[in-house]
Image: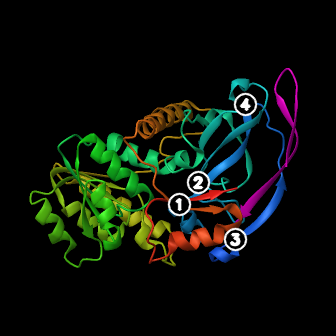
């Protein structure tokens, strides 16, 4: 329930009761709980956003296992990103935001019917783009765009390998790479191969014991870039598939999702391996992509630069969507109250869907 009153200064919230999904600890999806919480009115520099669309990502699957590096202590509300409409603003915030559809990268807190956020972190969604479409491209679109253009700097005519090409990030990444003019090889379950071919991707079965040989058949001299979400043994294989000047971008450790040791013990060997490869005089380059890198402290110069970069890149992604050069891949849509079912689908080994799983408050 949201009730507001208007003054000459700003819109002040009288009563805001939000429905949220609470992650109480390391639980199965069925252990997620719906709760209600009264929100404070937006303070100076803040805005109240009525959430229209949020989603399930790999991050939430890792967080419920306590496997996401830097996650908050339990209990907390998950939700890495969201799209919604600005219902109220605090002092110092441009009232032109009122009624506007906005996107936000939150890391946590998005699984709610309403949120209070720093207004400077909001990115306006262009007219003509729906909430669910925009939602598929916030964390996934930013990750894919920045890895492709800022990390690997892929050019037309190059060949890239995308692991998990049918996933949330992968399905966006292959489209962006093809739009750039690159040739794309993608690993995925055979059930997704037809859909990937329709996107112009050359699919390879990720379960093939001779995966490296299959990729080398397609790219005998190696590939110009690999985008690896698995970590572990996969990242070593990915590095070996590069050509003489290729770039490896690692961006997750999905293969270690069910490990029981502290997550830092999975990250440190990966980071050490990437650093060692960069030390070698091979001409190749390896890096780990972190969407929050360089975000800095609140209101710092680094945070302002981070916001500007995010706004610029997300605007590019939204423009590609608006122009029909990028398609929002929505795998399924669930009410927020059915978040357990949504997570079970996202984590199912037999999942037959491609793209992002949307939650609608």
Instruction: Say which quarter of the image contains residue 14.
Output: top right
Mark 1 and mark 4: span between their CA atoms?
28 Å
Q: Is residue 81 above or below residue 197?
A: above
What residue does disc 2 label? 80
| Residue 321, image x, y percentages | 44, 41
In the image, is 112 to the left or to the right of 143? right
**Observer-nearest of 5 and 278:** 5
| Element assignment for label 1 | loop
**Observer-nearest of 119 and 278:** 119
Outermost residue toward the top in this view: 8
Q: Is residue 241 above or below residue 158?
A: below
Ranked by sequence position, the earlier of labels 3 and 1 is: 3
Mark 3 and mark 4: span between their CA atoms?
32 Å
10 Å crowding of disc 3: few (<14), some (14-19), many (20+): many
| Residue 76, image x, y percentages | 71, 61
**Observer-nearest of 142 and 353:** 353
Ranked by sequence position, the earlier of labels 2 and 4 is: 2
Q: Is residue 236 above or below residue 156?
A: below
Q: Tell me the quadrant of the picture where the C terminus can be found.
A: bottom right
Residue span colored magenta: 1-22
Q: Main secondary structure of the magenta part?
A: strand
The numbered disc on residue 57 is 1
What residue does disc 3 label? 32
Q: Is residue 349 within the magenta segment?
A: no
The numbered disc on residue 90 is none
Ranked by sequence position, the earlier of labels 3 and 2 is: 3
| Element assignment for label 2 | loop
In the image, is 30 to the left or to the right of 162? right
Ranked by sequence position, the earlier of labels 2 and 1 is: 1
10 Å crowding of disc 2: few (<14), some (14-19), many (20+): many
Q: Nearer the viewer, mark 3 or mark 4?
A: 4
The numbered disc on residue 98 is 4
């Amino acid at each position: 329930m949201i009730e507001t009153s208007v003054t000459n200064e700003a819109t002040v919230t009288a009563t805001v009761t939000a429905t949220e999904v609470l992650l109480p600890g390391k639980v199965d999806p069925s252990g997620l709980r719906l709760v209600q919480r009264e929100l404070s009115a937006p303070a100076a520099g803040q805005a109240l956003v009525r959430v229209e669309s949020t989603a399930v990502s790999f991050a939430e699957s890792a967080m419920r296992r306590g496997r996401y590096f830097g996650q908050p202590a339990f209990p907390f509300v998950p939700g890495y990103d969201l799209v919604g409409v600005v219902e109220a603003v605090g002092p110092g915030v441009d009232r032109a935001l009122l009624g506007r559809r906005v996107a936000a990268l939150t890391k946590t807190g998005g699984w709610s019917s309403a949120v209070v956020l720093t207004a400077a972190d909001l990115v306006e969604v262009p007219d003509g783009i729906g909430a669910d479409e925009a939602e598929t491209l916030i964390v996934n679109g930013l990750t894919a765009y920045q890895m492709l253009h800022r990390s690997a700097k892929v050019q037309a005519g190059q060949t890239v390998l995308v692991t998990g090409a049918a996933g949330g990030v992968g399905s966006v990444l292959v489209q962006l790479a093809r739009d750039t003019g690159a040739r794309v090889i993608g690993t995925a379950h055979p059930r997704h191969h037809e859909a990937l071919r329709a996107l112009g991707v050359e699919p390879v079965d990720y379960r093939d014991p001779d995966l490296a040989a299959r990729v080398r058949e397609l790219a005998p001299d190696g590939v110009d870039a690999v985008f690896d979400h698995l970590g572990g043994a996969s990242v070593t294989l990915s590095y070996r598939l590069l050509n003489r000047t290729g770039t490896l971008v690692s961006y997750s450790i999905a293969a270690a999702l069910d490990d029981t040791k502290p997550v830092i013990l999975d990250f440190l060997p990966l980071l050490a391996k990437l650093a060692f490869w960069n030390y070698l005089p091979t001409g190749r380059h390896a890096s780990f992509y972190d969407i929050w890198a360089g975000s800095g402290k609140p209101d710092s110069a680094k945070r302002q630069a981070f916001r500007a970069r995010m706004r610029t890149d997300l605007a590019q992604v939204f423009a590609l969507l608006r122009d029909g050069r990028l398609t929002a891949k929505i795998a399924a849509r669930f009410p927020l109250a059915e978040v357990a079912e949504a997570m079970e689908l996202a984590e199912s080994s037999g999942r037959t869907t491609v793209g992002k799983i949307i939650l609608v408050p």
